[in-house]
Amino acid sequence: MADKPLVMITGAGSGIGKATAQAFARSGYPLLLTGRRIEPLRNLGLANAVCAAADVRDRDAVTAAIAEAEAKYGPVDCLVNNAGIAPLAKLEDQDPAEWRDLIDINCTGVLNCMHAVMPAMKARRHGTIINISSIAGRKSYPSHDVYCGTKFFVHAVSEGARRNMAPFDVRVIVVSPGLTDTDIPSTMKNEAAKEFWEKGRDAVGPIAPEDVAKTILFAYQMPQNVILQELTISPTRQEY
């Protein structure tokens, strides 16, 4: 049994999730790392980490992964709900199959993971949920129509959960990155949307996933009676 409590990070194989896993590992936390593919998780080579190929859309896979990690390291004290996708496009130009994936992963996936840990956190009167949203969860951007909708959803659900969990000393935090240097462009099939995103990235210069990870770790390590309810982190030059 580790000295520090268990931290669960979804979408931990790349980008912000990967950087967050590395930051928490350096700070000595045992980890439950999930993703759709297990190889990138294992390739991180982190000590005291349970790696599970658990798609956040699959509630049974999520709960099975949690049970495996908790048997080894005790209850999940922090959930970093990071898994998400960002195929951008105008609503009328987007393949409806992409809408389904956006909603299933960015919305239902977030709910599945929250639902899996909230009852036990509530019963223990201790725990932290950190939902990774986006600056696009507070502002709309061209060619972000459905994506923005999913991130606005994360903010709304988090606000409701925060209200419900606060009397039980459980924190629900939203971290909203702006332009960040991840593999998001590789998931974009719509060329107009990709061009818009890359133009913005090149104009302001993206922040590093490691800086987002530092913010997540800082928010978690605040005393349990202190909550940084919502944090937005972006490049200094990102004016909107």
Image (cartoon, helix red, strand yellow):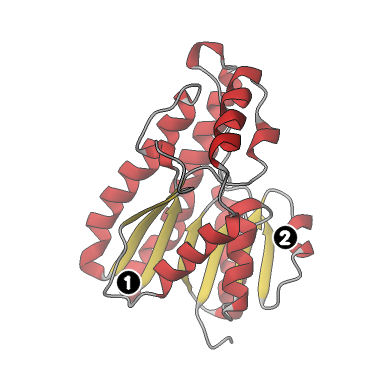
**Figure quadrant of the N terminus:** bottom right
Of the residues shown, which amino acid type is indicated by label 2?
Leu
**Figure quadrant of the C terminus:** top left
User: Alpha-carbon distance for marks 1 and 2?
Assistant: 30 Å
Q: Residue 104 at x, y = what percent? A: 52, 36
Q: Residue at x 62, y 74 (%)?
A: 25
Q: Residue at x 57, y 67 (%)?
A: 67
Q: Residue at x 28, y 56 (%)?
A: 162
Judging depth in this view, the residue of 31 and 55 nearest the camera is: 31
First in sequence: mark 1 vs mark 2: 2
Q: Residue 215 at x, y = what percent? A: 46, 63
Mark 1 highlights which residue? 123
Q: Is residue 232 above or below residue 19?
A: above
Q: Could you tell whether 136 is left or right of 2 in the image?
A: left
Q: Give the label, 1 or 2, closer to the camera.
A: 2
Q: Residue at x 66, y 19 (%)?
A: 191
Q: Is residue 117 above or below residue 183?
A: below
Q: Indicate the secondary structure of the residue bearing disc 2.
A: helix
Q: Residue 185 at x, y = what percent? A: 66, 34
Q: Residue furthest top?
A: 92
Q: Residue 32 at x, y = what percent? A: 60, 67
> Taking the image as drawn, is residue 87 in sight?
no
The answer to which image quadrant residue 226 occupies is: bottom left
Find residue 236 and name its label: none
Of the residues shown, which amino acid type is indicated by label 1?
Ala
Judging depth in this view, the residue of 188 and 66 nearest the camera is: 188
Mark 2 highlights which residue? 41
Whether the residues at callouts 1 and 2 have beta carbons within 8 Å, the answer is no
Judging depth in this view, the residue of 4 and 122 nearest the camera is: 4
- Callout 1 environment at 10 Å: few (<14), some (14 to 19), or many (20+)? few
Judging depth in this view, the residue of 208 and 31 nearest the camera is: 208
